[in-house]
Amino acid sequence: MSQLENGSELLAGLGGTNANNLFDANVQRLNLCGFDVQEVRFDGFATNNQVRGTSKRHYDRIIKFVEIRVEGAPPTGGSLVVQLVVAGTTLSQQYTVAATGNYAFIAVIHDGNGGGSDPFTDSVSGDPLSGPGVLVLGGIASGALNMANAQTLSVQITTASGASDVVVTIHSRRRIL
């Protein structure tokens, strides 16, 4: 048996049960390292309550960080405020870039919506990425793909403060049960 660069092991020469167990371990290892990045652009001058970047995925995502880049005019007179919208509901956590600023990299606090900790995302034993996160459900239920069941994820500019050419990047990890 030999090990690949991504940490998984080759199955050559193993019996059926051992190969299955090794395959399951490799899938878990790969999914633990599976990251999802979604970039949402607000070209031109942003406006208050503007929503863009609505997406669905076939797998569950746990949003860990929100990155905001202001590539045009910085916010003036107040902060640029961004919020996530999951399944049509605007979450309460606000991600901000201070007036005259042009960058922020902000961690999700608990569930991103003012709630307490989530036992799955806050303390997964042996998971280096455990901690707070916004869970966005994918389109797989009972082993079948049904994208109608997947939750949407969007980004809302709550307060634009005159900022332009804003790019919001959502950093998530995949969760496959």
Image: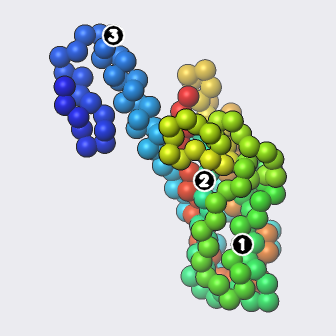
First-in-chain label (3 vs 1): 3
Badge 2 density bin: few <14, some 14–19, many ≥20, Cα 10 Å: many
Q: Is mark 1 on a helix, strand or loop?
A: strand
Up-down relation of residue 52 to residue 117 (above or below): below
Q: Nearer the viewer, residue 153 or 134?
A: 134
Give the vertical position of 164 relative to 124 (above or below): below
Image mark count:
3
Q: Which colour scheme is used?
A: rainbow
- Separation (CA) of disc 2 from disc 1: 16 Å
| Residue at (57% x, 82% y) in the render | 71
Q: Is residue 136 visible?
A: no
> What is the residue that sits farthest to the top in this orientation?
16
Name the N-terminal-most of marks 2 and 3.
3
Q: Kindly indicate the quadrant of the structure image that contains residue 160.
A: bottom right
Q: In this view, does 156 lie to the left or right of 145?
A: right
Task: Name the amino acid, label 1.
Answer: Thr
Per the image, the residue denoted by label 3 is 17
Few, some or many residues within 10 Å of mark 1 (<14, 14–19, 20+): many
Q: Which label belongs to residue 64?
A: 2
**Residue at 59% across / 30% down in the picture?**
140
